[in-house]
Image (spheres, rainbow, N blue to C red):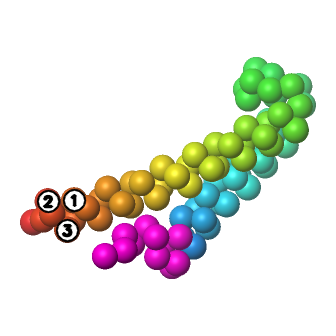
Amino acid sequence: IMSIADMEEMENIIDEATDCFEDKMKKLFDEVGEEHIQDMLGVTNQMDWSGQVCFAAEVLRTELKLAVEKIEIRLKAGEFK
């Protein structure tokens, strides 16, 4: 039986959440302002921040998928009775 995390609808939801996270984090750079980026974000420029955000978004995507799979296994095992 295929995991729900591998089903297209669930993958789309995980992608949507990850894309939203990525967009919000990229906007954070503009909100923080050039003079505070080193202190608040630990980066020196937008390209550096953008690269870190993309990496973080991929980690989030993987973690969300794993979380769905773990909860699904627990549900099928009867843990939520």
Proximity of marks 2 and 1: CB atoms separated by less than 8 Å: yes
Q: CA distance from mark 2 to mark 1?
A: 5 Å
Q: Is residue 69 above or below residue 56?
A: below
Q: Amino acid at mark 2?
A: Glu
- The reply to whether the magenta stretch includes residue 51 is no
Q: Amino acid at mark 3?
A: Lys
Residue 43: in sight, yes or no? yes
Residue underneath mark 2: 79
- Which residue is located at x 83 percent, y 34 percent? 48
Q: Residue furthest top?
A: 39
Q: Is residue 31 above or below residue 42?
A: below
Where residue 23 sits: x, y (%)?
73, 55
Stretch in magenta:
1-11
Question: Within 10 angstroms of label 1, few (less than 14), some, or many (20 or more) residues?
Answer: few
Where residue 55 sits: x, y (%)?
68, 43
Residue underneath mark 1: 74
Where residue 81 sits: x, y (%)?
9, 66
- Which residue is located at x 52 percent, y 52 percent? 62
SS of the residue at dot 2? loop
Proximity of marks 1 and 3: CB atoms separated by less than 8 Å: yes
Residue underneath mark 3: 76
Q: Amino acid at mark 1?
A: Arg
Residue 36: in sight, yes or no? no
- The reply to whether the magenta stretch includes residue 10 is yes
SS of the residue at dot 3? helix
Q: CA distance from mark 3 to mark 2?
A: 8 Å
Q: Is residue 65 left or right of residue 1?
A: right
Q: Is residue 15 left or right of residue 40?
A: left
- Which residue is located at x 80 percent, y 26 percent? 43
Q: Nearer the viewer, residue 6 or 22?
A: 6
N-terminal-most mark, 2 or 1: 1
